[in-house]
Amino acid sequence: MTTVGILGGGQLARMIALSGAPLGLRFLVMDSAADACAAQFAPMVLGDYRDQGALQEFASRIDVATFDFENVPAEAARWLAGRVPVFPNPGALATAQDRLAEKTLFREHGIPVPEFAPIASRADLDAAVERIGAPCVLKTRRLGYDGKGQFRIRDSESSVEVAWKSLGGQAETVGLILEAFVPFERELSVVAVRGRDGEFRAWPVTENWHVDGVLSASLAPARVDEGLAATAVGYARKLAEAMDYVGVFALELFCKDGRLLANELAPRVHNSGHWTIEGSETSQFENHLRAVLGLPLGSTRMVGQACMLNWIGAMPDAAAVLAEAGGHWHDYGKAPREGRKVGHATLRADTPQELAAALSRVGEALGRDGQVAPVVAALGGAGK
Ligand code: AMP
């Protein structure tokens, strides 16, 4: 019996464990929160990633390790890799943890990125704002997620001052980076998988909508022409090969004037790939396990059209989604809390028109017309 260890016990670990059950796998998660939601389905080692004793116990009970969370200290990942196989490799994890390292990697491989500059001091910030121009975004290099650790600088000197006041204290701890603000037409992601033998597969490119930096809805396939989709997938492949990456990852991209700019790479299964559970032949979670275990990868072929809606803060009533022929419900078993991802729904249909109609019905029933509206518009409207 193979036991897969997962560092991090959130909803991603939970969905990995659920998808691994039919493969006959066992799981062990490690998390510092006693109420981590994956622990409802898998035993857990409760402890901080810097706690050697807890890591030792974790390592002794697993055959292979992976992550549900990228901000595991690189030293912990390296220590573990000296004892059990770890995928993705700790070097890839370290690069993807650091916005400066990953943007530098993108650029080295000819992948276009918004202009950026490392920031170590207020003088650096002034010089970078001068060079890059406003609007721009000051971000922490590490530990930021879901729009946290970011500050948008609009145009004035006072806005630079406020940005520095809010994030300057972290210049020496997690580091800072300034990026040009991209007035994108749409946001896309490539969710892809690479096996231990180097085999690479990508799911159809996904289109994403964020609210306050947090993913709100994803639509697959994205409305992009084949050439652009192939370019996006080509970037993902190049990066996976450069990092000798094994497992599932997501490359987030902005699309502006028909051109792609890479934003970031998430070294794990990704929220914009949740639709693959019902919308494709093999889900991102199962293919991640197949990759990590050296098994043949499953097909990433889509089944129809799919839209995922994130539930943030509290779960709505499930009935409207469950009443849809292609409606699927995912409750992560978390206590409600403002800003927290507590669940999602996926709607699947054979045609864009049917998907738009289902989304409209669900949006209306749940009082979430605003959340579904951009997706319905992207699909060409809900008809009558
Ligand atoms: P991130 O944590 O970098 O993925 O940022 C979260 C979200 O904030 C992105 O998905 C975008 O919607 C927005 N965002 C981040 N960086 C930029 C940027 N340079 N220009 C425009 N929007 C951005």
Image (tube, rainbow, N blue to C red):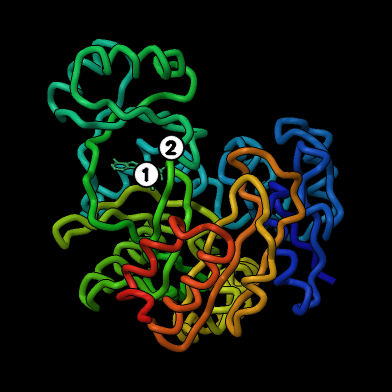
**x and y percent of residue 112 in the render?**
21, 51
**How much space separates mark 1 and mark 2, taking CA atoms?**
6 Å
The residue sitting at the front extreme is 384
Q: Who is closer to the viewer here, 87 or 366?
A: 366
**x and y percent of residue 182 in the render?**
23, 44
Q: Secondary structure at mark 2?
A: loop
Tell me the number on the disc at residue 377: none
Q: Quadrant of the C terminus?
A: bottom left
Q: Who is closer to the viewer here, 233 or 238?
A: 233
User: Does residue 46 appear in the picture of this structure?
Assistant: yes
Q: Quadrant of the N terminus?
A: bottom right
Where 372 sits versus 20, above or below?
above
Q: Residue at x 49, y 42 (%)?
A: 146
Where 46 sits versus 193, above or below?
above
Residue that badge 1 annotates: 102
User: Does residue 196 appear in the picture of this structure?
Assistant: no
**x and y percent of residue 43 in the render?**
86, 54
Q: Residue at x 38, y 69 (%)?
A: 376
Mark 2: give few (<14), some (14-19) or many (20+) Cα within 10 Å: many
**x and y percent of residue 304 in the render?**
46, 86
Tell me the number on the disc at residue 98: 2
